[in-house]
Amino acid sequence: GANTGSPTAQGAVQLINRERAVVVDVREPEEFATGHMTGAKNVPLNQLEEKLAATVKNKTVPLLLVCASGARAQRAVATAKKLGYERAQAVSGGLKSWKEANLPVEKA
């Protein structure tokens, strides 16, 4: 479907500002180091199941999952929901769309 409910980069910013959404970058640490959304926490996709609960203790906040283009983040949403994060969402277009929207990116 066209509308999977994934927020765009701009929509993600609104969730962060209004609802204190938590951003989790599911790329590998070396990718994360080259640039990531300001304030994002890095939990690689293959470690999400074991590390997410320790990284994001509040399961009621919106959880924004991001990767390079959006594909891994979609997989991460399924894992997060299984762990009880009802409001987990993938950021549509990933970091690429974030940069295209001229939103802040920081390097490690």
Image (cartoon, rainbow, N blue to C red):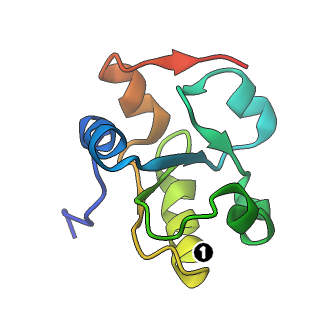
In the picture of the structure, the residue carrying the numbered disc 1 is 79
What is the quadrant of residue 56 in the picture? bottom right
What is the quadrant of residue 13 in the picture? top left
At x 51%, y 78%, the residue is 81
At x 48%, y 42%, the residue is 69
Q: Is residue 77 left or right of residue 7?
A: right
Please state the horizontal and vertical placement of residue 71, each as a whole percent of the image: 50, 55
At x 28%, y 51%, the residue is 7
- Quarter containing the C terminus: top right
- Quarter containing the N terminus: bottom left
At x 29%, y 22%, the residue is 101
Please state the horizontal and vertical placement of residue 14, each as a whole percent of the image: 25, 40
User: In the depicted view, which residue is nearer to us: 26 or 16?
Assistant: 16
Residue 48 visible in the picture: no
User: In the depicted view, which residue is nearer to us: 54 or 34?
Assistant: 54
Q: Is residue 63 left or right of residue 33?
A: left
